[in-house]
Amino acid sequence: MSESRREFLRTLSTAAAASLLPAQNALAGFGLKLGYAAITWNGQDEQAIEDISSLGFHGIQLRSNVVEQWGTRTQELRELLKRKHLAPLCFSSGTVDADPAKQQQYVATHTKHARFVKDIGGRTLQLISRRPKDRPPSDEEFQRLGTLLDEVGRRAQDVGVRLVYHNHMNGIGEAPDEIARVMDATSPKLVSLLLDIAHYQQGGGDPVAAVTRHRDRIRVLHLKDVVSPLPGDTRPARQSYRWVELGRGTVDVPGVIATLRKISWSGPALIELDAVTDPSLTPRDYAAINKKYVVEKLGLSL
């Protein structure tokens, strides 16, 4: 039996009792809305909806692959989420870059996705950026990305949806100062920040400090953890990492939550794990482990 399986079986037995703890996140002004990202289910979105709902979460983040299945049946998806008591807290719309030849295509695609988000009852659209290969982004590329994000943000706003930029490894906004440059290149009225605390740390930053630095732009939070560098890996530390369940990595997740409390932040926080790391466990198993962590260790309620 794997160590992950042993830990899962050891700890899950107390999860039900832990979920009955009094809500400790109801401090004045602190209104974190906790949900779970469907990415772990690798496109099996109906199963993700079922599992996330069954664990007691009330919010979900879906990805752009659902447009192919539900694009002409948005009302059906909206009703499914409503039956499962899941609010679509954020929608992963895809990846863009600073190539001027693709700007019109990007605007059209993500405007379409914004309408989809609105139709299923959501209010937030997420974009990631793609970094140039083997070199840092140029000044011109930061500006072009900013112009693109503003335009998508304007179109999204017109249909009642807010655009958030997701800091990400291998993105134009990877390192802390690069993320700040993307924020500087965009209008606060049109573009907010989705702060992913594990990507921020892997990009060379302190996610606790990031909360204060970007307090006026953060609209969505990704609760995520990372191990880096990996034992025995000869690659540079920047490239040697694995996303892991909360509490198994080196991100100061409690410090992030404490700082959010101090600034009375109110917004969606999505727990995210890109993929299962132990094939003997299911995505739902990992979601249960993460739920236990946020309830017992962070004092949050669903």
Image: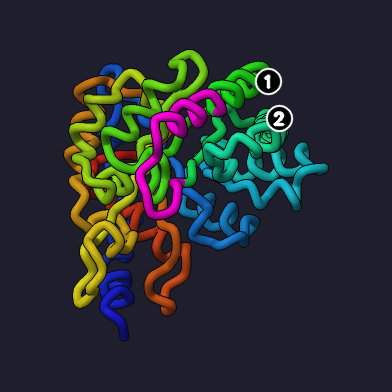
Residue 112 sits in quarter: top right
Q: At x 34% / y 55%, what residue is drawn?
A: 290
Q: Is residue 11 left or right of residue 121?
A: left
Colour mode? rainbow
> Which of disc 2 and disc 1 is earlier in sequence?
2
Q: Amino acid at mark 2?
A: Arg
Which of the two residues, 15 or 132, is positioned nearer the viewer here? 132
Structural crowding at the residue carrying mark 2, measured as other residues with C-alpha within 10 Å and reported as few (<14), some (14–19) or many (≥20) = many
Can you identify the residue that label 2 sits on?
115
- Position in image of residue 73 (x %, y %): 80, 43
Tag shown at residue 159: 1
Residue in the picture at 47% in, 62% down: 284
Disc 1 marks a residue whose amino acid type is: Val
Taking the image as drawn, is residue 72 in sight?
A: yes
**Residue 149: percent from the left, percent from the top?**
53, 27
Can the viewer see residue 302?
no
Query: Residue 95's spot in the image, x, y percent?
Result: 55, 44
Q: Is residue 95 left or right of residue 168?
A: right
Q: Is residue 41 magenta?
A: no
In this rendered view, identify the residue nearer to me: 235 or 73.
Answer: 235
Placement of 26 over or under 238, stated as above or below: above
Residue at 23% from the left image edge and 56% from the top image edge: 247
Q: Which residues are magenta?
A: 131-148
Q: Is residue 43 left or right of residue 195?
A: right
Residue 147 magenta-highlighted: yes
Q: Nearer the viewer, residue 256 or 152?
A: 152
Q: Are marks 1 and 2 in contact (CB under 8 Å)?
A: yes
Q: Position of residue 133 (x, y in %)?
A: 44, 53
Q: Secondary structure at mark 1?
A: loop
Query: Disc 2 on helix, strand or loop?
Result: helix
Q: Could you give the CA–CA distance between mark 1 and mark 2, rounded to whole angstroms?
A: 6 Å
Q: Quadrant of residue 1?
A: bottom left
